[in-house]
Amino acid sequence: MAALLKQLMGVSHEPFATHDNLATTTLNITQDLESLRSTIHNSLTVGDKIFGQMGHADLTQDVNERNKDLQSKKDTLMNDIDKKEAIINRSNRDFSDVSDTIPETQPKKKLNFIEDYTMAILSMAYVFMLVTAVYFYVSTTTDTIATALLQSILGSAFVTLFAFMLLYYLT
């Protein structure tokens, strides 16, 4: 019959050999699957001996405890963040009058970085520095007190003008 089929189809005997090889390979795969199944069963048996048959219950309990611990840490951190945000919001109220007077988009020509209290403190410190410089110049010079005082006041006026022009140019 195979010879008749071979003559009708003009096919060589090789495909029939391929079918025979396929059947043999399928039987070998079945044996491999049985071997793998027995290996898995042995591994499960060893796992039951090590962890016990109810080992998954212990793992579930450990996972639940860890979840509760992490949830409590999360709640603690969230409360801490809320407290710190409240402090920040209270602190921001101190500067709300300044932020209300400044527009949202700052002009590129002028920078508003020196504000009320900062400017007052800087001015007082500058005046104190000038008074100290005048005192040291008058006390160390050999000229008369009036001449030394006039020279130091004129010098401090030039320094003040120069500093004002520099700051005006920068802002």
Image (cartoon, helix red, strand yellow):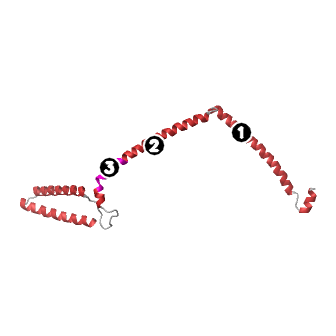
- SS for callout 3: helix
Task: Judge by depth and name the residue closer to the eye, 78 or 35.
Answer: 78
Chain-order first, disc 2 or disc 1: 1
As drawn, is 50 to the left or to the right of 76?
Answer: right
Residue wearing tag 2? 74
- For the record, the magenta segment spans 85-96
Residue wearing tag 1? 39
Task: Please tell me which residue is depicted at 6% across the width and 61% down the height of the picture.
Answer: 146
Q: Are marks 2 and 1 in contact (CB under 8 Å)?
A: no
- The three-letter code of the residue at mark 1 reads Thr
Chain-order first, disc 1 or disc 3: 1
- SS for callout 2: helix
Task: Please tell me which residue is depicted at 21% across the width and 56% down the height of the picture.
Answer: 120
Real-space Cα separation, disc 1 to disc 3, in angstroms: 67 Å
Task: Judge whether residue 87 is colored magenta.
Answer: yes
Q: Quadrant of the C terminus?
A: bottom left
Residue wearing tag 3? 90
Closest to the camera, between mark 1 and mark 3, is: 3
- SS for callout 1: helix
Chain-order first, disc 2 or disc 3: 2
Q: Is residue 65 above or below residue 123?
A: above
Residue 158, percent across and down?
A: 17, 65
Closest to the camera, between mark 2 and mark 3, is: 3
Magenta segment main secondary structure:
helix
- Few, some or many C-alpha atoms within 10 Å of disc 2 (few <14, some 14-19, many ≥20)? few
Closest to the camera, between mark 2 and mark 1, is: 2
- Few, some or many C-alpha atoms within 10 Å of disc 3 (few <14, some 14-19, many ≥20)? few
Task: Please tell me which residue is depicted at 19% across the width and 65% down the height of the picture.
Answer: 161
Real-space Cα separation, disc 2 to disc 1, in angstroms: 43 Å
As drawn, is 165 to the left or to the right of 49?
Answer: left
Q: Quadrant of residue 6?
A: bottom right
- The three-letter code of the residue at mark 3 reads Arg
